[in-house]
Amino acid sequence: MSKWKEKIAGSQLWRSIFRHGAPDTRRNRIMLVLDNVFLHLHPARLRRYGLRLSHTWCMGGITWLLFVILTITGVLLMFYYHPSKGAAYQDIKFLKYDIPFGPFLRNMHRWGAHLMVITVMLHMLRVFLTGSYRPPREFNWVIGVLLLVLTFLLSFTGYLLTDDQLGFWAVTVGTNMARSAPVIGHEGPLGKELGMNKFNDIRYAILGEGEVAGNALLRAYIWHCIALPLILIVFAFVHFWRVRRDGGISDPL
Amino acid sequence: MVFFYAIAIRRMIAFDRGNDVDERDKDMVLTYPYLLRIEFLIAIAVIIVLIVWSITIDAPLEEEANPSLTPNPAKVPWYFVGLQEMLVYFDPWIAGVMLPVLIIIGLMVIPYLDFNTRAIGAYSFRHRKLAVMIFSFGFFLWVLLIAIGTFCRGPGWLWFWPWQQWNPHKVMIETNINWSQLFGITGKASSSVFGGLTVLLYYSAWWIAPYLWVKKKQGKFIENLGHMRYALFIFLLASMAGLPVKMFLRLCFNVKYVWTTPWFNI
């Protein structure tokens, strides 16, 4: 048996894919982390207190894991969805009642999204309580706040995509607040004086029209599926890079 | 939130007593297997929780969007319900635009306002009293607003205790008054001036009080912070404290506006 193992593990095919041996020596354990594109986000070694769950709560990692899960379930959902009035709602019903594992897929995406909002807030709480935003980590905190806002926006744009009463009116209330923005909203302070009206203010720009209708749905779809995830990934990479660059999990002493 | 605060408080007490970190904690350990093992287990736990949650509870789906039928109440998603609740106390341009922007900016400037060098990377209360108290207050206020908006608001955005049945025909006879009317001032211009003075007095009181406190304690807090940062800090703190003040005035005294002008009302 072990002869076969040696034969396979010694073959060119195997050695071209797995470039170091099994991680049972110190060298191989280090190489496993450094040589792997997914794992090399981690340092090869870290301080022992960084392992303690009561220190980090693992919230940052959980948030990123949820984002990956949401991306995968989101892409799968996209196969069944047309972002136009009339079709969108029927597609969701189709998912709920006709497609095998449709309800499961949709639920994973929905509850994963809510869970991600919760974990990102808990991550912010943890980073604050450990004071891990002190120099040199100040700007990483700012990027973290940006990621928080992007998470909220992702969740909000996704809310409209079902085109049901819940989503439609939630977005109506939300965008109606935009028309009250000072200066750039047509119902806000100084808006009228500057010539803002229903068809040229910030709310119009967000919705693509005067009401929450087909254009708004399409824009929410593009923001939710393409623009916001791309922006979030860029900032997330900066966030992760800065954590490593600034010395990993913050030192208590 | 209670669970994680409990963990944090336990760690804070341990650190402040001096028996939180022992010498072994500073050792370097290999990422594989120790960190990756923990991460792997947590990832599996999260995925299992998500799967069980998704199998047992269905995501909500109501009837198709109908622009001519408004649900009563029409609520935004739970993480924004706090903002919607703020609409009771402030006009939309404040509750929906100014306050969220101030919250985001306020969060972003925290590292630049906090120059306390003690207890970095550790949970501590004794060395970070002010910071922990202010942040916890803000966090708790945010959660409170979400709780009120989710559980205590029914049709017409009227107050319903969680155990009360929602009655869409409930009528509340409430006459809202303005702050200046509480003091018997009724003219438009004089109300405007009175309101403006009140707001000015409020922010000034917040600005001056710490100066007197620091002087009494003979500390160097404001000196070290610098006047610009101090002014920003007090502005943000006073604005955040203004929310529960306004909530109190509105819920108990039916005060709608503290300051009325022809262009905006606060």
Image: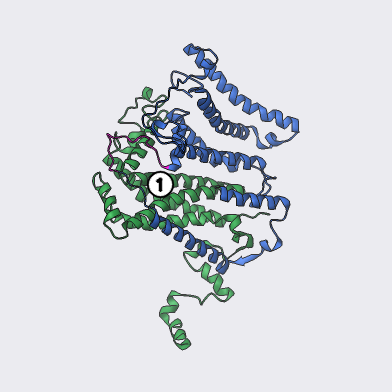
Chain colours: A green, B blue
Residue A242 screen position, x and y as percent: 54, 53
Q: How many marks?
A: 1
Q: Which residue is mark 1?
A: A155
Residue stretch rendered in magenta on the structure: B63-77
Chain to which the residue tagged by mark 1 belongs: A
Quarter holding residue A191: top left
Residue situated furthest top in the rendering:
B187
The C terminus of chain A lies in quadrant = bottom right
Q: Main secondary structure of the magenta part?
A: loop
Compare residues A79 and B62 and report the one nearer the observer. Answer: B62
- Inspect this view and state whether residue A247 appears: no
Compare residues B79 and B212 and report the one nearer the observer. Answer: B79
Residue A37 screen position, x and y as percent: 47, 65
Compare residues A25 and B10 and report the one nearer the observer. Answer: B10
Please tell me whether residue B150 is drawn above or below residue A228 in the rendered image. above
B69 inside magenta stretch: yes
B196 inside magenta stretch: no
User: Amino acid under label 1?
Assistant: Ser
Mark 1 packing: few (<14 Cα in 10 Å), some, or many (20+)? some
Secondary structure beneath label 1: helix
Residue depicted at 32% across the width and 38% down the height: A207
Residue depicted at 42% across the width and 56% down the height: B53
Residue A224 screen position, x and y as percent: 36, 48
Residue B246 screen position, x and y as percent: 53, 27
Residue depicted at 54% across the width and 62% down the height: A42
Please tell me whether residue B122 is drawn above or below residue B43 in the rendered image. above
Please tell me whether residue B29 is drawn above or below residue A226 in the rendered image. below
Compare residues B220 and B32 and report the one nearer the observer. Answer: B32
- Inspect this view and state whether residue A34 appears: yes
Residue situated furthest left in the rendering:
A86
